[in-house]
């Protein structure tokens, strides 16, 4: 992502992925080209700044015509437990809905209980057996249908 303020996000996220899943997990960050997270292709990158420095962020990309896929939800380790990730998710949902998406899809890894908790707490429906050992599932998929009221008001 070309904005230099995204660098800390990607570095810390890559380090976390590597610590939890091994060095090959950093390849996940390079799996989608930056262009997928820009407006012409239906995506958005959001950074929360404090004193000009990124403290949290995330993005979405077009998953399909009606669905946005959340990616790279992150809070700097020095700023966690302040509700910043929740703010990022809520703002990304608002932006996705404003762009006409009707659903949000996302996946997280089995060794990210904080992310799993965030998505459950923000109203996402798990598309997996929540009683099963996450390690036996692999990627944990979630979805959330966006409210139709604002879309109906615009049409």
Image: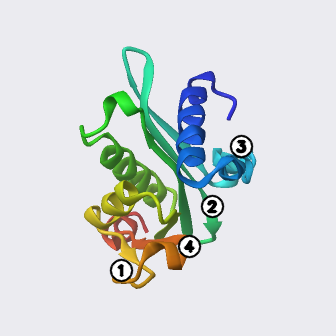
Residue 122's place in the image compared with 134, above or below, is: above
Q: Is residue 77 left or right of residue 70?
A: left
For the C terminus, give its image quadrant: bottom left
User: Residue 58: where, in percent of width, then height?
Assistant: 49, 44
- Could you tell me how far apart the alpha carbons at marks 2 and 1 are, in whole angstroms? 26 Å
Residue to which mark 4 is pinned: 138
- Of the two numbered discs 4 and 3 on the same chain, state the one appearing first in sequence: 3
Could you say whether the residue bearing mark 3 is in a helix, strand or loop?
Answer: helix
- Of the two numbered discs 2 and 1 on the same chain, state the one appearing first in sequence: 2
Task: From the image, state whether disc 2 or disc 1 is nearer to you.
Answer: 1
Residue to which mark 3 is pinned: 34
- Could you tell me how far apart the alpha carbons at marks 4 and 3 are, in whole angstroms? 25 Å
- Could you tell me how far apart the alpha carbons at marks 4 and 2 are, in whole angstroms? 22 Å
Residue to which mark 2 is pinned: 62
User: Residue 13: where, in percent of width, then height?
Assistant: 54, 40
- Of the two numbered discs 4 and 2 on the same chain, state the one appearing first in sequence: 2
Could you say whether the residue bearing mark 1 is in a helix, strand or loop?
Answer: loop
- Could you tell me how far apart the alpha carbons at marks 1 and 4 are, in whole angstroms? 12 Å
User: Residue 37: where, in percent of width, then height?
Assistant: 64, 47
Q: Residue at x 39, y 54 (%)?
A: 94
- Could you tell me how far apart the alpha carbons at marks 3 and 2 are, in whole angstroms? 12 Å
Q: Is residue 43 left or right of residue 101?
A: right
Residue nearest the observer in this picture, 104 or 129: 129
- Of the two numbered discs 1 and 4 on the same chain, state the one appearing first in sequence: 1
- Could you tell me how far apart the alpha carbons at marks 1 and 3 are, in whole angstroms? 32 Å
Residue to which mark 1 is pinned: 130
Task: From the image, state whether disc 1 or disc 3 is nearer to you.
Answer: 1
Residue nearest the observer in this picture, 43 or 111: 111
């Amino acid at each position: 992502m070309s904005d230099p303020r995204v660098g800390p996000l990607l570095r810390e996220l890559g380090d976390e992925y590597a610590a939890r899943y091994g060095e090959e997990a950093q390849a996940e960050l390079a799996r989608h080209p930056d262009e997928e997270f820009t407006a012409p292709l239906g995506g958005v990158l959001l950074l929360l700044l404090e004193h000009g420095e990124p403290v949290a962020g995330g993005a979405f990309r077009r998953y399909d015509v009606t669905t946005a896929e959340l990616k790279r939800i992150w809070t700097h380790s020095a700023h966690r437990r302040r509700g910043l990730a929740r703010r990022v998710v809520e703002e990304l949902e608002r932006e996705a809905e404003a762009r006409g998406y009707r659903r949000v899809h996302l996946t997280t890894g089995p060794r990210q209980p904080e992310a799993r908790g965030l998505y459950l707490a923000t109203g996402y429906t798990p598309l997996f057996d929540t009683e099963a050992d996450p390690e036996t599932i692999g990627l944990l998929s979630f979805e959330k249908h966006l409210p139709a009221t604002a879309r109906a008001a615009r049409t």
